[in-house]
Amino acid sequence: MDEISPKLQNQIAQFQQLQQQLQTVMSQKIRMDAMMKEMEMTIEELKKAEEGATVYKSVGSLMIKVADTPALLKEIEDDKETTEVRVKSLDRQEKMLKEKFQSVQEQLNRALGAQQQAPIKMDDEDN
């Protein structure tokens, strides 16, 4: 058990890489979901606003008065649609990575189980 075969080392590296990729995708998905919910709330509020109401848009650290509220609403709806597509893509990516992760994990468990059951060779045995 002192030495790990190169194949097993490769599987462990692959497992760690998949774990990092999965965490990254899940983190991105959480951020995108939050953005989408924020856009949905903004769309609802803009639709409830009275015609002619003063609306501001955040641009960096500035708040800018919007002259064309319907155009802003369309822009936010388009952004929401784009975000929905991205979330669906992240869902597919997450599912694929989870399946691959589970597969590599099972391979590692089998390999480590087999390695633990194999007799340990000592250098002294040759003498």
Image (cartoon, rainbow, N blue to C red):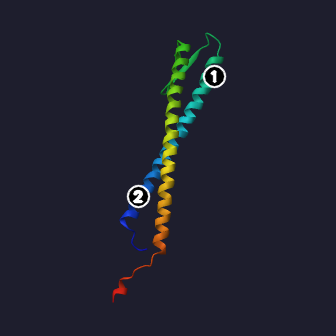
Farthest residue in the bottom direction?
127
* Residue lying at 47% horizontally and 67% vertically, measured from the top left: 112
* Residue lying at 65% horizontally and 13% vertically, measured from the top left: 50
Q: Residues within 10 Å of mark 1 (few under 14, many from 20)?
A: few
Pick the front one: 86 or 49: 86
Quadrant position of the N terminus in the picture: bottom left
Residue 81 against residue 21 in the figure, above or below: above
Amino acid type of disc 2?
Answer: Ala
Pick the front one: 60 or 91: 91
Which numbered disc, 2 or 1, marks the residue closer to the eye?
2
Amino acid type of disc 1?
Answer: Glu
Identify the mark at residue 44; answer none if there is no mark.
Answer: 1
Mark 2 highlights which residue?
13
Q: Can you tell which quarter of the image residue 36 is in?
A: top right
Pick the front one: 55 or 13: 13
Q: Position of residue 22 (x, y in %)?
A: 49, 48
